[in-house]
Image: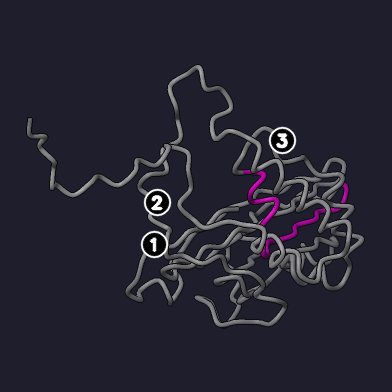
Amino acid sequence: MTTAVSTAPGRPARRPLDQLSLSIDDAALEAASAGDPAWLADDRRAAFEAWRALPGESNVLYTPYIDLRAAQLEGARLAFGGGTERGVGTDPDGTLPPDADGLIEITEGRLTSLVLSDRATSAGVTLASLADMLARDPDRVRGLMDVGPDLPDRDKFAQLTRALWSGGIVLDVPAGVRLERPIVIRWAVGTPDLARMTRTLVHLGDRARAVIVEELVASAGATRPGGQSFFAG
């Protein structure tokens, strides 16, 4: 009896719908936590363990909504830092749009533009990069995280962002301040094979009001040849 053996190339293993192809391990957590105060490192660790334990879909009895198979991130690396140094972005002059009370631009992790209107400045509005605020006043960052709305504790990918964010934005509007024009938050990203996670902290005091317009634009590095990029925040 002869048994036929197929010589056709084997199919690659099917990825689960909710499996992110980005390489994530304990070394990534250590890199994200480098230089953090102890309370923040503990918060990251708790989020990382939650990410590992949670399913991608909160309810597996229904039709899945998440399909990450189109994300080809095997060659991407997680970007950490960016620090407090200024970079060159899409708006080097730091021009405030005429219809805005503030503009902050982060280009591939670096602060590249930060402008507040005179009214917002005199009212005590704080607009800053999270890296700058953490370096200047870590206790204030901790307070904003404590009083702000928690990220969903059953959302796997929200917990991943909580664990591995490497920068972000802080907006703090004092009580009673009502901004008539929006605050523009602009992210310039897209460098191939680069993955970045961020966090935005927004705090409105009692009876305060603010409108936020978030923009996602291509950075100069986005035109380089290469694989996919990844941005979450």
Q: Which residue is mark 2?
A: 71
Measured in 3D between alpha carbons, the distance from the residue under mark 3 to the one under mark 1, in whole angstroms, is 28 Å
Q: Tell me the magenta residue range.
A: 158-175
The kind of secondary structure element at disc 1 is: loop
Q: Quadrant of residue 185?
A: bottom right
For disc 3, the marked residue is: 153
Left or right: 232, with 147 as reference point: left
Q: How packed is label 2: few (under 14 Cα within 10 Å), some, or many (20 or more)?
A: some
Amino acid type, callout 2: Ala
Tell me if 220 is positioned left or right of 80 in this view. Answer: left
Which of the two residues, 10 or 190, is positioned nearer the viewer here? 10
Disc with the residue nearer the chain's start (1 vs 2): 2
Mark sitting earlier along the chain (3/1): 3
Q: Earlier in the sequence, mark 3 or mark 2?
A: 2
Could you classify mark 3 by the number of other residues whose Cα lies within 10 Å: few (under 14), some (14-19), or many (20 or more)? few
**In the orientation shown, which residue stands out farthest toward the left?**
2
Q: Determine the residue positioned at 63% across, 69% down.
A: 80
Residue where numbered disc 1 is placed: 228
Tell me, yes or no, whether the highlighted magenta stretch contains residue 172.
yes
Q: Looking at the rendering, in which quadrant would you find the N terminus?
A: top left
How many neighbours does mark 1 have within 10 angstroms: few (below 14), some (14-19), or many (20 or more)? some
Q: Residue at x 58, y 69 (%)?
A: 79
Q: Which mark is residue 9?
A: none
Confirm or deny contact between disc 1 and disc 2 (CB under 8 A).
yes
Question: Label 3 sits on what residue type?
Answer: Asp
User: Quadrant of residue 92 in the image?
Assistant: bottom right
Q: CA distance from mark 3 to mark 2?
A: 24 Å
Task: Specify the quadrant of the image occupied by residue 158.
Answer: top right
Q: Position of residue 152 (x, y in %)?
A: 69, 36
